[in-house]
Amino acid sequence: MTAAREKLPQRGEIWWMQFPTDPPGKSRRPVIVVSPYGRNNHPRATTLLAIPLSTSIHKLTPGHLILRAGETGLREDSAALADNLCVVWRNDLIEPVQGHRPVSHTQICRLASLVRIAMGCAG
């Protein structure tokens, strides 16, 4: 049984996942769970909303938010790729990233604003 089935991922948590769309051999990557509590904890919900993280912070676009290592507990600063918001199967989450600190509500709302920009809805 996977960790995702044993524990319901919560908003702001950082989990490891392997994207089915990644090329073969690509390693798993961290994602921030951004869907609300009600969706994440609903007994019939099989999907949730997540934003991938990347350590390639030299390739930033307006849809990316820098999260400092001190803020997240990750080893490196990361870019949250809000312009790559995705629906993921809960069962595709592998396990929470060890030692992470959940991303704050404020930062998740900043990411939501960046999703609006990525969709051309800023203003």
Image (cartoon, rainbow, N blue to C red):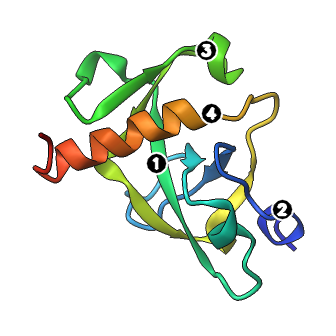
Mark 4 and mark 3 lie on one chain; the one further toward the N terminus is 3
Secondary structure beneath dot 4 equals: loop
Q: Which residue is mark 2?
A: 3
Q: Quadrant of residue 18?
A: bottom right
Quadrant occupied by the C terminus: top left
Badge 1, how many Cα within 10 Å: few under 14, some, many 20+?
many
Q: Which residue is mark 3?
A: 69
Q: Which mark is residue 103?
A: 4
Residue in front for this viewpoint, 11 or 64 = 11
Query: What's the residue type where badge 4 is placed?
Result: Val
Residue 38, position in %: x, y?
67, 69
- Distance from disc 1 to disc 4, alpha carbons, whole Å, reads 11 Å
- Distance from disc 3 to disc 2, alpha carbons, whole Å, reads 24 Å
> What residue appears at the point 16 percent right and 53 percent down from the top-left corner?
119
Quadrant occupied by the N terminus: bottom right
Residue farthest along the bottom direction in this orientation: 44
Query: What's the residue type where badge 2 is placed?
Result: Ala
